[in-house]
Image (spheres, grey):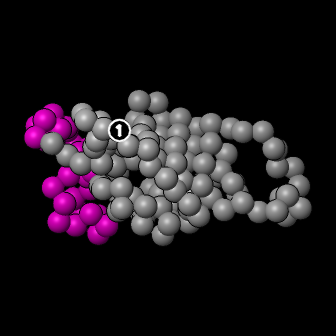
Amino acid sequence: LHATPFIRHTLRNCRRLLRPGGLLLVNEALATSAFAQITFGLTDGWWLFAADPARLGQSSPLMAWEHWRALLAESGFARSHAARGGGALRTQAVMVAQVARRPEAAWPAGVAAEAQLFSGGLGGLGLLT
């Protein structure tokens, strides 16, 4: 998700795809490195964030977990959690954010109860509704 021009718009659009109780599952890097800057900094997509008010002053599109958590809450997710690794994986996280649930009686007619998964492939996006 980090390789988008406006992260707030991206997260709001993800939120709109989910029904109450739906989950957003994202695998993201949380910090940049010299290797990442040299490798991905040569691609146009890496710099899409440059005009994003949510990321002004940053040297990369990657954001710390605290920044992600604030933006997820601002975008309508009721709760979120990050599982981070140690050692070489300390800057990587699998983040889960959930839309608030509604009582079963309030579900619109015709909404199926089964889960659906939208995947962004190798891009790290997964939406579970």
- The residue wearing badge 1 is 85
**Does residue 62 appear to the left or right of 83 in the view shown?**
left
Q: Is residue 108 visible?
A: no
Of residues 37 and 78, which is closer to you in this image?
A: 78
Q: Please identify the quarter of the rendering in which residue 127 is found.
A: top right
Whether residue 50 appears in magenta in the rendering, the answer is: yes
Image quarter where the C terminus lies is: top right
Q: Is residue 24 visible?
A: yes
**Does residue 83 appear to the left or right of 127 in the view shown?**
left
- The picture places residue 51, in percent across and down from the top left corner, at 24, 63
Q: In the figure, 71 relative to 123: above or below?
A: below
Please report the bounds of the magenta region as a residue range.
Answer: 34-62
Whether residue 86 appears in magenta in the rendering, the answer is: no
- The picture places residue 25, in percent across and down from the top left corner, at 52, 43
At 44% from the left edge and 56% from the top edge, which residue is drawn? 10
**Does residue 64 appear to the left or right of 10 in the view shown?**
left
Of residues 88 and 9, which is closer to you in this image?
A: 88
At 52% from the left edge and 48% from the top edge, which residue is drawn? 96
At 10% from the left edge and 40% from the top edge, which residue is drawn? 34
- The picture places residue 29, in percent across and down from the top left corner, at 31, 43
At 58% from the left edge and 38% from the top edge, which residue is drawn? 118
- The picture places residue 80, in percent across and down from the top left corner, at 52, 56
Q: Please identify the quarter of the rendering in which residue 76 is found.
A: bottom right
Which residue, as the protein is rendered here, is positioned at the far front? 86
